[in-house]
Image (tube, grey):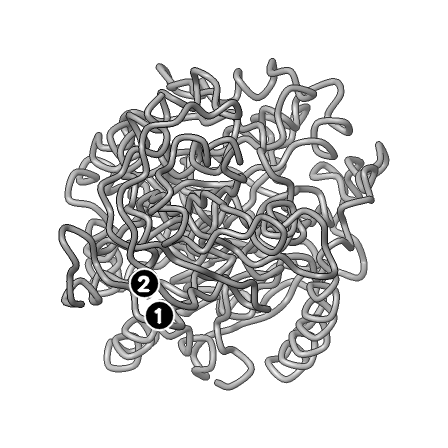
Amino acid sequence: MKGLKESTQTNSRAVLTDTGILIKDQQPYSSIEEAANPFEDEESQERSSGMFETASLISCVTCLSEADSSRAEVGNSLMVPANSVLPYGNILYAREINTNLRDSISDDTLQGMSYDSARSKVVELTFAKPRRHDLIPKKLILSVASLPSCSDIVQEIMKRSYKGTKVGKAILVIVNPHGGKGRASKLYVSKIKPILLAGGCAVEIVETTYRQHAVDIAMNIDVDKYDIVACASGDGIPHEVLNGLFKREDRVKAFNKLTVTQLPCGSGNAMSVSCHGTTNPSQAALSLIKSAEIRIDLMCCTQPSYAQQPRVSFLSQTYGVIAESDINTEFMRWIGPARFELGVALNVLQRKRYPCDIYVKYAAKSKNELRNHYVMHKERIRNSAMDLDSDSNDDDVVKTQDFELKYDLNEEIPSDWEKLDPELTNNLGIFYTGKMPYIAADTKFFPAALPQDGTFDMVITDSRTPITRMAPILLSLDKGSHVLQPEVLHSKILAYRLIPRIKHSVISVDGESFPLEPIQVELLPRMCKTLSFNGSYVETEFENM
């Protein structure tokens, strides 16, 4: 292994701060010669040679920005300005350089380093460095000052860099090779894999080869073998994985053990946008490594076609304009997300209506009630997120009884449910229910959605709404302010039953086509573990709307 062979002219000295590692100053020295490293095995060697772009000793972060590439250079190395900070959030791995290295370094080099083993340690850091729009793994060697309060500086760096989460996660990556216009596999190899390996994760990969393949994978995987199932895909693979876990005989164990997340490689990346706050694969990979687990509510769907085996939904269900715009434009998937916008525009201009009957169990019916509900639960989630270990020791959150549905599709409508006004449902334009704020990168359809508030959101529009009013409503989807408009019905609900009264249309669940027949949906509280960089969904600013 050629662990430390670098042609450099400087050495960086550093200290730990509350937010990152502060690069104090630089001192000139000659080159460090090749030295064997007992901590690196063959796999690590392969990683080093094939995945990393090893930084020189002083090409630290350049303030972690490509914009700093204009800094002065010394030889072939960028000069790092004093007081640059490498954030803990970008540190992937740290290890102490073998002190026997001193035997292979010249006296002049040691003198230049001012190396004092009693007060500092030579540490190799691997970190995620921004390059254009992506993150790439880089390596950096620092002489880090020891802290009086800790005996192991490397352990302290790792502790601060992985606060509230596990180091070296075991990950099963499921790649849909047809996702993202057929680019998913390439995105995984070039953007995601380097970050995961740099973070010391144990990664296995499987590619789907047929429809519903991820269902079969999730039904049969050894849940004790993995911490995370990461879906390098659009939203279809997370839907399949969750339903595969839901079908298992040991589903209680599966939902308690496994965390399901998305690495955005498809045309629809709602889970990644809502939880990781990005559609960039490399940034989502860093978020996967660093984020703490959170519990989110799921929704359970029942229809006559699969009455004996209900299906779970993590994202949304829709009927009407949105459903047809999504499902009926599948043949245009090659043009990307624009296909959906074109479909919506066409259906709205045609003023198509979708008659049905809708029965709802409300949690917060009016917009004022909804806002009060949101503020109360947002504050609760914010407070619990401050305790990063709140869920880490709760290994048995899900119980067998949590899978039991409260409502039967074949029974009469419960007395505490309300039937929506037929004047509205006979002229339905959009019926959309969901659990995550974003349904696409630029579509904040459910800005009041929260991960575990025990409800999901319902949005309804009337097809008779004038085009002059529908246009500004649709144009405000990126901001989420459409739900404030008087023409839009927006409520928090616990369950609903929708009965279509037309013969030709579609129902979409998590972007997948479902039978056009009565559908009943209810909430399954805190059923699924996922990852979120801030302990909740991405901020939507709904409070300030």
Q: Nearer the viewer, residue 517 or 406?
A: 406
Query: Taking 127 as reference, is 1 above or below it?
Result: above
Give the image quarter of residue 175. Answer: top left
Percent across and percent down for residue 5 are 29, 33
| 507 relative position to 209: left or right | right
Task: Tell me which label, 1 or 2, sits earlier in the chain.
Answer: 2
One can see residue 296 in this view? no
For label 2, the SS is: loop
Residue placed at 48% from the left, 72% from the top? Answer: 540
| 89 relative position to 369: left or right | left
| 252 relative position to 79: left or right | right
Q: Nearer the viewer, residue 78 or 262?
A: 78
Disc number lying in front (1 or 2)? 2
Q: How would you rate the neighbour count of disc 1 (Cα within 10 Å): few for under 14, some for 14-19, many for 20 or more?
A: some
Percent across and percent down for residue 281 are 34, 44
Q: Nearer the viewer, residue 120 or 453?
A: 120
Query: Taking 464 as reference, is 110 above or below it?
Result: above
Residue placed at 66% from the left, 51% from the top? Answer: 294
For label 1, the SS is: loop
Specify the farthest residue to the front.
Answer: 107
Circle 1/circle 2 CB separation < 8 Å: yes
What residue is shown with label 1?
477
Percent across and percent down for residue 360 are 66, 59
Residue placed at 77% from the left, 39% from the top? Answer: 405
Residue placed at 73% from the left, 70% from the top? Answer: 383
Give the residue type at disc 2: Asp
Percent across and percent down for residue 332 are 17, 40
Residue 442 - label: 2
Q: CA distance from mark 1 to mark 2?
A: 8 Å
One can see residue 208 in this view? yes
Q: Nearer the viewer, residue 268 or 410?
A: 268
Give the residue type at disc 1: Leu
